[in-house]
Structure formats: structure tokens, C-alpha cells
Amino acid sequence: MSIPDLDIGVIYTRERDLMPRLLDTMVPAGRGLSMRLLLVDNASDGVQPWLGYFPTTEVLRNSRRLSYAANLNRILDASTARYVLLMNTDMYFDPHEPCLARMVEFLDAQPRCGLAGCRLLHADGSEALAARRFPTLPLIAARRCGLGRWLRRSVDRHFYAERAPTDTWPCDWLSGCFLMFRHEAIRQIGRFDETYGKYFEDVDIGLRTAQAGWQVMYHGATYCYHLEQRASRQLFSADAWRHGRAYLHWLGKWGFQVRSKKI
């Protein structure tokens, strides 16, 4: 039995309105690839409607709701393909843009790249800014406390504003909505840190990828769409507090001395 080029992991709970567009556009985005869907049934309202989109779909069923990081680990544990892509359900592809095929082609040409992401766009075509530098206290203040107007330089630096979004470059970490790992790399790096639960697990895995000797790379020559909600945007929301706790865990684990790469 041949090894698939790409396993695509999706966590499904109750996002019934988002799944058809994601799955419909996913197939043409990977034209020419051997792909398998790893579908986590996170104690959902049922995954039966989503089983006919791919020739091969493996359902990973949870008897109870698991955290985001725990579900990502379920996907990584089940993956056997050359590459594994972790995707949010609030995403879709341009059916005329073979994003997945181009990302696999890119990774094939970059043998030291262990983790890659593509250009992300909002539905209106504006940039969703996938590549980021490691967070700093000024950045947290800017984004979580409404001080971005006064800390614009910190925000711009965080999102690599000096780079064109269609370029390709090594970065510190990538938005967790689209993470494509090389099989050999993730086996060396290890699983996501489940103590984060939600938020900062993508920052953490980016740092650990680099520490293991692999590159983290943003590839802006192809794209997909993200219907980003940013539930943590509101300061007093439950998600904002989860984000704050995750940042404290990040600081406790790595401290204030994590430095962005000079590129």
C-alpha cells in the first residue's frame, strides 16, 4: 500500500455550515496528490455527511470533547503520509488555485523545512497574515489592551510588515489554522503541548521546530482563505482569558528571552 502524499487533519464539532465549502474546495486544491482526510469527531453532532468527499477518510472519534491541542495530537498520531496538514474548519480554497499541490511541491524542494504555511486571505481578499515573530509584552499590550495605535511598530514587526505577502521566508511561527508538517520533522519534534489547551500551542510548536534543527517557512506563492473570528479580541471574553493564561504558560516555559531570527 503506497504512502499518501498528504494527510489533512480537520477537527469537527458542530461547524456544519462551514464543512461543505472547505471539503468541496479541498479536492481541487490538491490535484495530482494522493490525499487522505483525518477527520476528528470531537463528540460532535455526527460526521456522516462529511464522509463522501475523499476516497479515503479516517474518522478519529472522541467519546468526550477534547481540547484543541489534544485533538491536534490525535491527528499527528494517526498520520502516516509524507506530510500532514492541520486545518481549521473556517477555511476554504480557491478552486482554481492548487494550493495544497503547490505547498507539497515547495516542501519537496526544501528538505530542511519541517513546518510550512501558505499565504492567508480573508474572504474580502485582505491579508490574514500567517507568518509571525515571537510575542513580546508590547505586542500583547497592543493586541489585547487596545494599544495598537500607540504600539504600531511592535504590531508591524510581529507580522513581518517589511516583507511582501507574496514572498517566501523563514519565520518564527505560523498561524495554527494552516500548519503543514514534514513527517520526519514532527516525529522528531514531538506532539503539541496540551497544557496550552487553546492558544499559543502554535507558537510553541514553531519554537520547538527550530530548536530541533528544522526550518519554519512561510510560502507566499500560494494561498487559501480563512474566515477568521478572533474570539479572543474582546478583552473580557472567555477566549481572551484563555489567551492570557496560555501566554502566562508560554512565559513560564520559555521566559522573556526568546528572540526572533535575524533574517
Image: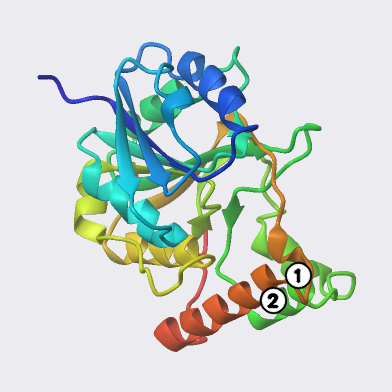
The one nearer the camera, 233 or 19, is 19
Q: Is residue 118 visible?
A: yes
Left or right: residue 139 versus residue 29 is: right
Measured along the vertical axis of the image, is residue 161 above or below residue 133?
Answer: above
Q: SS of the residue at dot 2?
A: helix
Left or right: residue 76 versus residue 245 is: left
* Residue pointed to by mark 1: 143
Choose top left, top right, bottom left or bottom right for residue 31: top left
* Residue pointed to by mark 2: 140
Label 1 with label 2: CB-CB less than 8 Å: yes
Choose top left, top right, bottom left or bottom right for residue 34: top left
Measured along the vertical axis of the image, is residue 201 above or below residue 182?
Answer: below
The one nearer the camera, 159 or 5, is 5
| Residue sitting farthest toward the left | 1
Marking on residue 16: none
Q: Amino acid at mark 1?
A: Arg
- Residue 38: x, y in percent? 34, 35
- Residue 97: x, y in percent? 58, 17
Measured along the vertical axis of the image, is residue 121 above or below residue 51?
Answer: below
Mark 1: few/some/many CA within 10 Å (<14, 14-19, 20+): some
